[in-house]
Image (tube, helix red, strand yellow):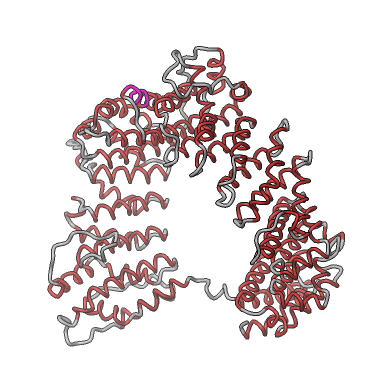
Amino acid sequence: MDHECSQLLPAVCAVLADPRQLVADDTCLEKLLDWFKMVTETESSLLLLQENPCLVELLSHVLKLPDVSPGVLAFSLRLAGIFAAQENCFQYLQQGELLTGFFGVARPLGQAAWAIPTIRSGWIQGLHSLAQHPSALCFLADHGAVDIIFSLQGDTSLFVASAAGQLLVHVLALLMEGRAEGHPCPQGDDWPTCAQKIVHHIEESLCSTDPSKVTQALNVLTTTFGRCQSPWTKILWEQLSPLVASLLEKDPVSAPHSLVDLLLCVARSPVLGSLDLRLWETAARALSCLGPTQAGPLALGVLKLQHCPEVLRTQAFGVLLQPLACVLKATAQAPGPPGLLDGTSDDSVMVDTLLSSKSSCAGLLCRTLAYLEELQPLPQRPSPWPQAPLLRAAVTILQLCDGSAAPTSSMGGRLCGTLAGCVRVQRAALDFLGTLSEGMGSQEQVTQVFAILLETLGSPDSSPTVLKKAFQAALRWLLSSSRTPGCSGLGPHMALFFPELFPVLQKRLCSPCWEVRDSALEFLTHLSRNWGGQADFKHVLLTSEVPELARQLLQDPESYVRASAVTTMGELSSRGLYTVPANPEHPEDQQSLLLEFLHILSVDSEGFPRRAVMQVFIEWLRGSHIDVAQDTEWFMATVLETVSQDLDWEVRAQGLELAMVFLSQMLGPLGPHCPYTVALPKASPPDLLPKVLAALCRVRLFEFAFRALFDCDRPVAQKSCDLLLFLKDKTIPYSSLWESGSTPNLESVEAALQKWQAGEQGQPLGDLEPEAVLATLRSIDLQGLRDTLAEGSDHVEKSPQSLLRDMLAMVGVLQKNQADCY
């Protein structure tokens, strides 16, 4: 332990042992425990206690105090466990009966203390730390601690109950791992007495009529089989699996969710998964016995297994498909293709669940669609994948939600009434429909998909979240259609879809709901990015009012919409899809997008639009946008001057990113993996350097970068440091070839830098000469500054010395305040 910490520790222990002192807060105690854990991982706990007797004195004193605070008592319990984790220290503490006092009585620490959940939690965590060696196991067995752990499994505090279950698993594993070292795995009758006691407790709980006790037992087994992969777990499962299987004989099944978790955990275990057929028989029985809500997760888990009997996989897939099969049967005018409907839609429980209430129907369908969506991209998904029936089901569910379905049965009519306007199911169905785009479908089905998407996008009843999902699904299907083999241009579906889409898009851009306007702009951006070069798309876009409507949204009252409009217009302009319309009557009203974006950057009160403008400017500079290329120096000077005064640190950081792109274009790329890399003409660095530095001085890039070097926001200072280091690496090797013999005067520069470092940002740097720039770059320890910035601002405050001093200082402040009261 650090010497200074040893000096501070007695005073801290005295504060903790004094009930009159108010400890700062529980966070300090948690940090203190973390520090002791770290120390004991690298040092002897026994030596630590011997060199710092105040720690043992603290533990002894806490045990004797009748009015110790719950926080300090819980802290002491956990601290004792941390020290006792090393066996020699365990023996040392037990000489004074400290551990018996903390952990060893039937009702530890007294009735009043035990009634506090924090104390019970500290007791469990302390025992968990302590239970690491044979002496600790004997202690647990001799002092009745295991029985207390059993009782705490049903604690009213969920945190305590969960921790008790975790501790029980830890103790059982420790008992068995210690017994198994160097010996063949014993049978259950030869296990340690304490291990047999735990197993017997699990058996009793599994046979209990109390569902909470069954849940506790199943959770302990799940944790055990998930963490322990030793041979003894196979014997444990063989002993308990009949009791687990018998749970399925009860009606209703006790703790179905925990039962599913256990079965899947056993199936995934490399030790247990290759057992005889009993596991798979139990899983198959569970798929048949459990209700739709519980069977779905089990079916999905079975289908995600790498190795599983094919019969069980088929049964599991049938369980997942059952709700969709019911929907199709209730609405289909013809049987449709075989496969999905065969033998799966006559389940009365499934029908009852679908029709019992709107919430149960929506919940079942949403879960089913989510499970299938998760399963679709996996390599172990069922093959052949029923793409066509699943597409029909997704489209049908959307039709039921928007009221356009034509049911052919009473069940279909009831489903229409149940699902009408159900936003939750619409969102899930649209997500699933988007996922199915990876598999495509027949020409007729793809046409139906685009039709239902258009219907959803155009419906006045579609909510903003549904419209967002519909836009996302439409984009995925458009991208999938464009990847169709042999497809050139837009393809038949897209050529038909786009003319019908743009009137809908125009409508959504004028929506009174800002979320809808925002989603429409985002969709338009993606369309332009993916198909902006297609002549057919260009024609449809430019003959519509969409570009002008998008530009008008630059003045939207909602900042998110303004930001999206900036991004959209930047993309349209980059691809030549927007030009300023001519206005012969009022030519003075014509303003380029560049000037409009600069105005937003200067005056918009919200950060999102300004950040969007800077991102567009970065892309424009990188892509040599015509408006930027006409006068790049004016563009850079104007933007950097504006950004330097911005209060949003992200905008200032983007200004440095823009400056880096400008530098890389003039001096060469940063490296093979640099995002700013661009194709450059080769030039001789010594010849190029004076011109480049002069240009950088003209745009005042150095003043911007040097000022940012002392920015109060660390990410900005780090970016500035990186930029100046890049510039230094590019220029210093050649500077001696052209610098004049005289030394430049740096007094004004150094004065400005000192004031900026002191927080006085108003000091201007003035006009810089290239020689002064190079001299300044040499004079600043940029690498050292970078290392300092990388450490963060709290590396000192995180030290244990700082923690101990803070705890003492807090007590001093409290004492002073108390003295003032009198």
Q: Which residues are magenta?
A: 444-449
Residue 244: say if magenta: no
Quarter of the image for the C terminus: give it. Answer: bottom right
Quarter location, residue 430: top left
Position above or below: 605 against 24? above
Position above or below: 237 against 645? above
Quarter of the image for the N terminus: give it. Answer: bottom right
Quarter location, residue 267: top right
- Magenta residues, dominant SS class: helix
Q: Is residue 570 left or right of residue 510?
A: left
Q: Residue at x 74, y 74 (%)?
A: 90
On the image, the x and y values in percent for residue 593 come to 26, 46
Q: Residue at x 18, y 69 (%)?
A: 692
On the image, the x and y values in percent for residue 511 come to 41, 31
Residue 448: say if magenta: yes
Q: Is residue 429 visible?
A: yes
